[in-house]
Image: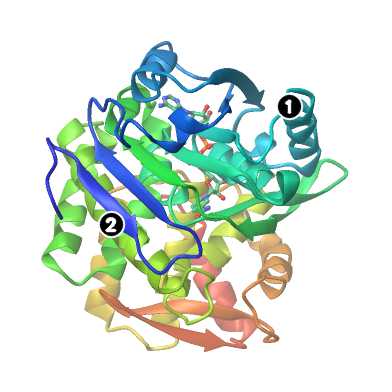
Amino acid sequence: MPDMDGRFEIVFKNCSRNCSGVCGHGMRMPLGEHSIASVADKACFVTDGNMPENFSRILERIFPKPGKKLFYRLPRSENAKNLAEIEKMCLFLYENGFSQNSVIIAAGGGAITDSAGFAASVYMRGIRWISVPTTFLGQIDAGIGGKTGVDLRLDGRICGKNIIGTFWQPAAIVLETEFLESLPPEELRSGAGELAKYAILMQTEEGRGLRKAIPGVLAGQPQALGLCVQICAAMKARIAARDERDIYGIREKLNLGHTAGHAFETMSGGRIPHGIAVAHGLKFAINLSKEKEIIPKETAAEMLDLISLLKLPTLELKEADFSRFSELISRDKKNRGAKNRFLLPKGFGQVEIEENILDSLLKKAYMGAISGA
Ligand SMILES: NC(=O)c1ccc[n+]([C@@H]2O[C@H](COP(=O)([O-])OP(=O)(O)OC[C@H]3O[C@@H](n4cnc5c(N)ncnc54)[C@H](O)[C@@H]3O)[C@@H](O)[C@H]2O)c1
């Protein structure tokens, strides 16, 4: 990883569109004088209404002179990931003369990069966008890799997470770790849920480094956050470049914990932060792997200890909610015709796919996953 003044560069090779990113602290024009943002005729900064005071100062420093600057606010968090909001945003772009020479700069958490990236992919059949993730979860995962999308809703309530979406690589990714200084503890904990996934997926020294960094991440220590962003962003970029469209089984492993996690998120009506739901989903996957005797007991215990570092809140779900859980996992978009399909950990750095698992085993794993700690 080349070091550039405390920054490193991520380059996506083999992707449908050229995409490069920079990661670091205190960036100034990170993508060069002739960056997309500078040459575009218009730039629309998309944020949510909850941004801290230092936000526009940092954005101003990173993007000092895009042609014409406009600002658009999406609703906060998961409420942004809504088709009706995308239509409103496209109307705003249209009324302001945005064309294929213009650029969208999505600056916010994963909900903003997912939804503004999705709008960029469908507006005029696709315009350029720059991903500027500002949460820890966004910088290690959501803002990288070009999966964009919104949730499916019925009567205003989420009934399917990320069901409407596209693959649309950002022209550039900016991972400015200074944004993370204003993150509240619950957002750091949520990001640590995805971090635990990376730590389980890595068998290497770097994976052990991630495990050790969890307490520092929860305490908001810049060094721990910066280290994790570097390691995870590089891994996500490598995987997305090798299997951009998620068809060769390489990118699929990044979904560890997500089948159950998305079900928990949907069942909470979007109240549980994504990373917390994923962390409970990881517990589910580890428990199920134990039930299926895929993972050695000591390794499962080591993984569960790692997750207990997150001090997860108990999910407000009961045994009686299992039938709804079972229905949601049977509709997972990755089932490929099976009744259910799960990625299960075999060991650190190793996963296995299991399909059509009996309800009795699923229920045991579910009961273990909904408890706290
Ligand atoms: N596309 C992908 O590959 C991918 C991967 C993982 C997750 N996701 C999606 O990402 C979303 C979750 O993202 P998230 O965890 O970033 O949550 P989020 O986008 O809901 O943001 C969480 C909160 O943090 C606030 N916030 C953002 N930046 C801040 C900052 N610098 N300081 C203070 N507050 C700040 C936001 O206003 C919001 O209230 C989910 O919708 C999930 O499905 C997508």
Q: Is residue 226 visible?
A: yes
Image quadrant occupied by the N terminus: bottom left
Between 63 and 236, the residue placed more toward the observer is: 63
- Tell me what residue is drawn at x 36 percent, y 38 percent: 174
Asked which secondary structure carries label 1, the reply is loop
Judged from this view, the residue extending furthest toward the top is 53
Q: Is residue 271 visible?
A: no
- Tell me what residue is drawn at x 83 percent, y 40 percent: 156
Q: Nearer the viewer, mark 2 or mark 1?
A: 1
In the image, residue 162 above or below residue 260: above
Label 1 Cα neighbours within 10 Å, binned few <14 / some 14-19 / many ≥20:
few
The picture places residue 37, in percent across and down from the top left corner, at 46, 31
235 left or right of 207 in image: right
Which amino acid is tagged 1?
Gly
In this figure, which residue is indicated by the disc labeled 1? 97
Asked which secondary structure carries label 2, the reply is helix
Q: Disc 2 and disc 1: Cα gap in Å?
A: 36 Å
Which amino acid is tagged 2?
Ala
Label 2 Cα neighbours within 10 Å, binned few <14 / some 14-19 / many ≥20:
many
Judged from this view, the residue extending furthest toward the right is 155
